[in-house]
Image (cartoon, coloured by chain):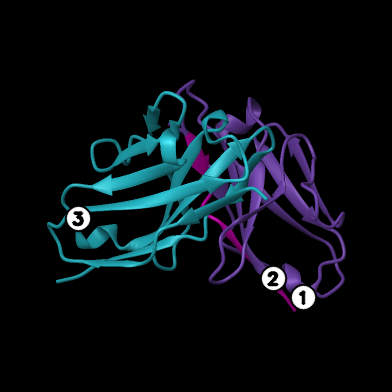
Chain colours: A purple, B cyan
Amino acid sequence: SSELTQDPAVSVALGQTVRITCQGDSLRSYYASWYQQKPGQAPVLVIYGKNNRPSGIPDRFSGSSSGNTASLTITGAQAEDEADYYCNSRDSSGNPYWVFGGGTKLTVL
Amino acid sequence: EVQLVQSGAEVKKPGESLRISCKGSGYSFTSYWISWVRQMPGKGLEWMGRIDPSDSYTNYSPSFQGHVTISADKSISTAYLQWSSLKASDTAMYYCARRDSSGWSTWGQGTLVTVSS
């Protein structure tokens, strides 16, 4: 099986840059995708692959990866970015499973 | 427009059975896997398993294998998640999601399942 580890909470001042990280062995083999979830809403895909944004996602969102760590960076955080963020990747053992990180609650101050 | 529409909230007693649904529209239902994701109250997302609607082939997370059953009826573009005997610990929001080349880009609105005596 595989685990993805995220910091439970991160805060950022309005307009500043914040990086949310995700660690796990599977990230050495597979890219992470990132999902934003606001209270009472379904998750929304914000980053996938090496560093791709679905249509409609602001370009202040970007992704990167190095070794066993994937990162989601928000450059110039806005109040509406306050949400929970989850990373997701394949299981590293070759099994057809998917795993989510525990989630990071982002607070915009 | 690609959409997944889930069935409504359910309130059940422990030991009861339940099947919730997820209807796809706006795309070829048999061309994309559907996954189910659990979110317990105040907790994170958990991938439960997936189904290929074209042939109903399934994969389950080890954490959910044997506890739930995922199925699909391609004739009505609908996937299902079912329990034969609910427990209080099954109380959660359940989402279906369609995976394409970019990831899970389409999600249902969620179905809240409450299990209480």
Give the SS element for disc 2.
Answer: loop
Chain on which label 3 sits: B
Q: Are marks 2 and 1 in contact (CB under 8 Å)?
A: yes
Image label count = 3
- Where is residue B105? Give x, y as percent: 64, 46
Residue type of the residue flagged with mark 1: Ala
Are both tags, 2 and 3, on one chain? no
Q: Pointer 1: what residue?
A: A79
Where does the C terminus of chain B fall, quadrant-wise?
bottom left
> What residue did someone put label 2 on?
A82
Which residues are the magenta region? A98-109
Rendered residue at 29%/36% (across/down) = B65
On residue B10, the disc is none
What subunit carries mark 1? Answer: A
Look at the image and say whether residue A69 sits in the magenta stretch.
Answer: no
Q: Main secondary structure of the magenta part?
A: strand
Q: Identify the residue at image location x=24%, y=42%.
A: B67
Residue A19: which quarter of the image? bottom right
CA separation in Å, label 1 and label 3: 40 Å
Front one among B15 and A78: B15
Q: Indicate the secondary structure of the residue bearing disc 3.
A: loop
Furthest residue toward front: B75
Q: Is residue A105 magenta?
A: yes
Say if A21 sits above or below B112 in the image. above
Which numbered circle lies on residue B86?
Answer: 3
